[in-house]
Amino acid sequence: MINITRRTALAGLAAPFIMPRFALAQADNRPSIVIAVQKTANSNTLDVLREQSNVGERIFFSSLWEGLIGRDWLNGLGRVPLLATEWRRIDDTTVELDLRKGVKFHNGDEMTAEDVAFSFGPDRMFGDTLPSANPKTLPYSERIPGLGTKEVPPEVFGVARRSWPNLIKVEIVDKYKVRFINGSPDVTIEGRISRFGSEIMNRRAFVEAGKYIDWARKPVTTGPYMVAEYKPDQSLTYVAHDDYWGGRPPIKQIKFVEVPEVSARVNGLFAGDFHFACDIPPDQISLIEKNPAFEVQGGTILNHRITVFDKTYPALADARVRRAMTHAIDRQSIVESLWAGRTVIPKGLQWTYYDDMFINDWEVPAFDPKLAQNLLKEAGYKGEVIPYRLLNNYYTNQVQTSQALVEMWKSVGLNIEIQMKENWSQIMERTPTRGVRDWSNSAPFNDPVSSIVNSHGPNGQAQQIGEWTNTEFNGLSNQLETSTDRAKRKEIFRRMLTIAEREDPAYTVLHQNATFTAKPKAIQWKSAPAFAMDFRKGNFSL
């Protein structure tokens, strides 16, 4: 096993290279590796619908969970066949898919249309929630008698309906063919099928599990690796699924170890305790690469760091105060000083991979301290305290960024008070002291509904926990989800950005997120422009 007793004296110094030891099974010459991460899972589960997080993306894809339509992690993140080999539009509400034959779950079962239909059925995904478009057609008759909901947390059903607001059912055509039937026209069905949360699970394993938590900590899926041991808040160990349809995995065992401190991750990498160290801050990259045996890979990803406003907090009720906060931020200074210029300021909550839905002439609020001061004066702001909730560097540079923001806000007359919290439940908790919080938003597929509607629309988390709502915005969310006129949809999206980022701010974008991973050069591996780490055949060797 890997030696865990050696330590370098100081993180970042050009220590002599110590190649990590690779544990080799007696009858198997594939290596076992250890990956140091800041966190494995926030929910202490491995359910892709419960663990909707950046850290979840890292441990799930492309190791454990797989969907019908995948993402080309190493070549532009476009859609690629995964558990489905082909798909086609039947009409504006229906997509038909041909399933890959011979796919084996971790328990040896073959994946069939029954598993796919169950993965999107009421027992697994929707509970007693109903699609808004046609609530009477949800096939409750297809629920398994006596199964109930197995104490599935309501958050699972909430995420499912947020991801699939109008899905009626997945219809079995034959053993290897299914149809997704929506309750309203939707140009994004294919994107929703490929998104985080639409992965396929083994029906029998879920039905036979004693309780939800028993299944959620060892889900049976189709990925190249399967769960061997999960110790919440400590470690997660995968072993190779040798019957994987995509070829024998190149690694015998992968162990993710929680190491919250950056210095400990870097020290462990130099000492040979870890083969990979994740979430490396930009200021550590040059220090690590002073040792010619190591390298750091990574860059910007499809995730933006944002600050979210609770407009129900009295001092933030006036939109002019929130607008002042957006104009007080010198984003370029944050990018240059904390990220060494390794990320960018995006054009609001959107990404260029939206293609023709990308609004190129949009910009984040300008850095204008004088305008911020005037807005505060117009709003009658008298220096009331505004609480700012955050975690201790869950995001790279989180604390340093928050400290910079507080100083920028202070310079225009805002009185912001940092409140450190231990977990996301405390961040989201509705109390009289919830004012501003840290967050990030991703784009699971290449359309605006995947982010601005999913995160801030009527079914999005911000509105569900009571931070913000806007009647016009909510009506536009429904139009964006159901319109098939792309030109009209782009106009709708622009208006939604205007409301949520300028007129009645729900959030403000700080910068595009970036992630960096350090490793020995002797390990041949390519990082994805995402939190996900791909260890499938063809992307790992010594």
Image (spheres, grey):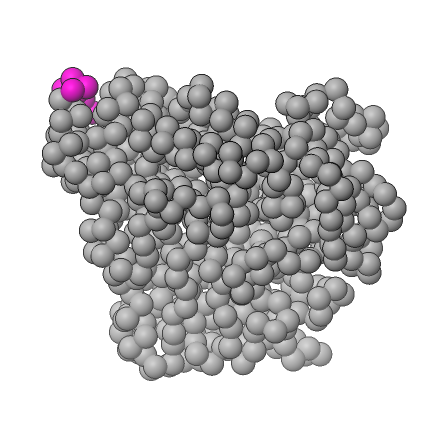
Visible residue check, residue 231: yes
Across and down, in percent, residue 25 comes to 65, 75
Look at the image and give the residue range highlighted in magenta.
378-385
Indicate left or right for 379 with 52 as reference.
left
Image quarter where the C terminus lies is bottom right
Q: Does the magenta stretch include residue 382?
A: yes
Left or right of 337 on screen, residue 161: right
Magenta span contains residue 270 = no
Picture coordinates of residue 378, whole percent (x, y) = 16, 20
Q: What residue sits 29% from the left and 19% below the top?
A: 317
Is residue 251 left or right of 282 when viewed as pictured? right
Which corner quadrant of the image does residue 312 belong to? top left
Instruction: Please tell me in which quadrant of the rendered image residue 510 appears.
Output: top left
Q: Position of residue 415 (x, y in %)?
A: 17, 29
> Which quarter of the rendered picture does the N terminus lie within?
bottom right
Task: Give the side of residue 202 with respect to residue 163, left or right.
Answer: right
Nearer to us in this view, 428 or 91: 91
Residue 156 appears in the rendering:
no
Report the residue at 31% width, 50% height from top.
345
Task: Reply above or below: 319 against 392.
Answer: above
Residue 375 percent location from the top left of the image: 18, 25
Q: In this view, does 136 lie above or below 391?
A: above
What residue lies at 21% left-to-right and 56% top-to-bottom?
Answer: 337
* Magenta part, dominant SS: loop
* View extreme (right): residue: 174
Residue in view at x 82 percent, y 55 percent = 110
Image vertical order of residue 275 relative to residue 415, above or below: below
The residue lying toward the viewer, choosing from 138 and 215, is: 138
